[in-house]
Image (tube, rainbow, N blue to C red):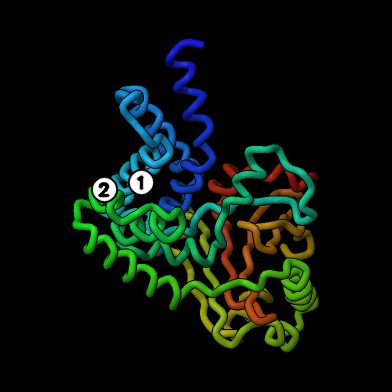
Amino acid sequence: MDEKEFLANRFEAHRGHLRAVAYRMLGSLSEADDAVQEAWLRLSRADAGAVENLGGWLTTVVGRVCLDMLRSRASRGEESLDARLPDPIIGRPDAEALDPEHEALLADSVGLALLVVLETLAPAERLTFVLHDMFAVPFDEIAPVVGRSSAAARQLASRARRRVQGAAPAPDADLARQREVVDAFLAAARGGDFDALLAVLDPDVVLHADTGVAAGGALKVVRGAAAVAGQALSFRRASQQARPALVNGAVGIVAALEGRPVSVMGFTVSGGKIVQIDILADAERLRGLDLTMLGD
């Protein structure tokens, strides 16, 4: 085995972790892959023999790449929460074995509700929170990436943490209970039962719907049980062909019309009530998702 092949094998051992970091930073699977590839290019050009902790070095490199990508988005005024939902990660509802890469991706995923909040953070806040709170990277290692002191990086993470804790609902851990609540929501939507919808929705439920640039661009946000129930009734036709799925590790559905996926819906169930619904209905982005594991 030559030196380059040896280095490539060492990098591959870290790929899953690096993709998880990049996905949390960017909310985009394709951009996460781009960031990981850029990390490999930088490693191949570096003196890898001088790197004592390759995993830590690669993590901070990916963080730096993602930070640059987020700042580029901000400078263009694109890809903010006002325009898009994060990419969902879809899995089988029966936890049947997937291919190893997808299984690892699903296992490493975080809820859409948390990713939606991360989209609202400033780039440096997002980086410090993701690296420190999710991956235990010390502030001394984060500080050079954001160009701040260690104390300032700690403050950035603290500010981000307060935003996340105040806005990202913690889902119920029991998937079977989540499924009961979502099934009741679907039954009520199919039957046009407004009162039954209200019974499973938290009074302060929030719905995000991303229909894509071609359909108007802006992310639609609906708040309150009555308003969300009204939206759910308009979903009645598509719900007839809804298939259960895991969406970022939580209960969700893939809705179809005439066999063609038209939306992915992720649900956050907390305290036995639906507190958040995230709907991706962007036709272009749906075509880019891997839904083959759900079957025909």
Residue 170 appears anywhere in the view: yes
Identity of the residue drawn at 50% across and 65% down: 114
Residue 77, quarter of picture: bottom left
Q: Position of residue 66 (x, y in %)?
A: 35, 46
Q: Secondary structure at mark 1?
A: helix
Quick check: 164 above or below 246? below
Residue 186 appears anywhere in the view: no
Q: Position of residue 7 (x, y in %)?
A: 44, 22
| Viewer-nearest residue: 199 or 213 | 199
Which kind of residue does numbered mark 2 sit on? Val
User: Which label sits on residue 63?
Assistant: 1
Dot 2: within a 10 Å radius of its alpha carbon, few (fewer than 14), some, or many (20 or more) residues?
some
Image label count = 2
Q: Are marks 1 and 2 in contact (CB under 8 Å)?
A: yes
**Closer to the N terminus: mark 1 or mark 2?**
1
Residue 205, quarter of picture: bottom right
User: Which label sits on residue 145?
Assistant: 2
User: Which label sits on residue 223?
Assistant: none
| Viewer-nearest residue: 234 or 279 | 279
Which kind of residue does numbered mark 1 sit on? Gly
Identity of the residue drawn at 63% across and 68% down: 267
Quick check: 221 above or below 290? below
Mark-to-mark CA distance, 1 and 2:
8 Å
Q: Position of residue 291 (x, y in %)?
A: 68, 45
Q: Secondary structure at mark 2?
A: helix
Identity of the residue drawn at 35% across and 68% down: 160
Q: Position of residue 198 (x, y in %)?
A: 68, 86
Quick check: 173 above or below 194? above
Q: On the rendered structure, is 113 left or right of 70?
A: right
